[in-house]
Image (cartoon, rainbow, N blue to C red):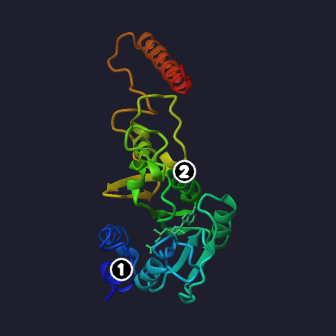
């Protein structure tokens, strides 16, 4: 018994049954199944029909990861102090996923992870914070997973089911990263790619789970050169180049004005 679905059933993890995440995980994780990987999961679990506060309950998914990655080091993080014995390859930290001090304690000890799973509070603010912090500590070639994205559509969980364009929801934050994957294709010489643009090559959206691959994003545009469309032909090259530069400058100023207007409440 060593596929993730069987292990989820054995250890009573809701990653199969209540959700269907194990098939998604297997797609991205199976090539590293027998490697000495480092794995971090936010959210240890242990629901007692009211909340997750029982210190002796939980660890279902940590057991599943431990048995799947037989040579892996598995790290859990939970806001509740969990006293669960899972063997010497598993360590659980206590603290919030949106506390820089907590996250620093983890990355100080483990440096970089092959896989990071966010199954914690599912609140957009926390999800975005943890991703922005931890993505730096994902290995090149590693994957970051965000579970239970339905919370982005549910008000009580900090989401918004009425206005799907709400920029504060986690789903919209991750949708915005799609443009970063294509940063070499953006016709705007003023566009400044950030760390995410330079290090994300894949984002997969599934029902309730997002998968992001960290990898050097080096593929050049087949149309643009340094985010510009070159002036074609041979006549009046200098004049046409100058006009194009003025056009780019005008478009840039227009985009800045639009950006400012977005923040002015009238
Ligand atoms: C859905 S459960 C995790 C289930 C577990 N990953 C599994 O599959 O068996 C969510 C967990 O996140 C924890 N949690 C909630 N808010 C958190 C936060 N801000 N930081 C870290 N953990 C948090 C809860 O205490 C709870 O144990």
- At 42% from the left and 81% from the top, the residue drawn is 64
Give the CA separation, mark 2 to mark 1.
28 Å
Percent coordinates x, y for residue 163 in the rendering: 39, 37
Look at mark 2 in the image and give the residue it sits on. Answer: 125
Crowding at mark 1 (Cα within 10 Å: few <14, some 14-19, many 20+): many
Q: Is 175 displayed left or right of 127 in the figure?
A: left
- At 51% from the left and 55% from the top, the residue drawn is 127
Percent coordinates x, y for residue 153 in the rendering: 39, 48
Look at mark 1 in the image and give the residue it sits on. Answer: 8
- The image quarter containing residue 67 is bottom left
State whether residue 147 is above or below residue 256: below
Crowding at mark 2 (Cα within 10 Å: few <14, some 14-19, many 20+): some
Q: Secondary structure at mark 2?
A: helix
State whether residue 207 is above or below residue 8: above
Q: Is mark 1 within 8 Å of ligand 1?
A: no
Q: Is 237 displayed left or right of 265 in the figure?
A: left
State whether residue 53 is above or below residue 234: below
165 and 195: which is toward the camera: 165
């Amino acid at each position: 018994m060593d596929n993730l679905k069987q292990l989820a059933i054995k250890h009573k993890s809701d990653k199969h049954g209540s959700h269907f995440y194990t098939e998604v995980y297997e797609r991205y994780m199976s090539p590293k199944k027998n490697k000495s990987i480092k794995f971090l999961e936010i959210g240890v679990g242990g629901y007692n029909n009211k909340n997750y506060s029982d210190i002796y309950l939980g660890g279902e998914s940590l057991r599943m990861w431990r048995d799947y990655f037989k040579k892996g080091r598995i790290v859990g993080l939970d806001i509740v102090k969990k006293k669960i014995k899972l063997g010497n390859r598993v360590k659980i930290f206590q603290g919030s996923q949106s506390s820089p001090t907590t996250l620093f304690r983890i990355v100080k000890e483990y440096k970089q992870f092959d896989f990071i799973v966010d199954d914690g509070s599912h609140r957009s603010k926390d999800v975005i914070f943890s991703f922005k912090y931890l993505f730096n500590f994902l290995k090149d070639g590693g994957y970051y997973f965000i579970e239970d994205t339905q919370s982005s559509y549910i008000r009580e969980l900090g989401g918004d089911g009425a206005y799907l364009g709400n920029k504060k929801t986690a789903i919209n934050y991750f949708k915005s990263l799609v443009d970063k994957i294509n940063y070499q294709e953006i016709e705007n010489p003023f566009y400044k790619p950030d760390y995410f643009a330079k290090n994300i090559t894949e984002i997969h959206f599934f029902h309730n789970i997002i998968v992001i691959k960290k990898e050097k994003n080096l593929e050049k545009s087949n149309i643009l050169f340094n985010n510009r469309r070159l002036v074609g032909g041979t006549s009046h090259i200098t004049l046409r180049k100058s006009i194009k530069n003025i056009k780019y400058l005008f478009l840039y100023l227009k985009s800045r004005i639009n950006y400012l207007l977005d923040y002015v409440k009238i």
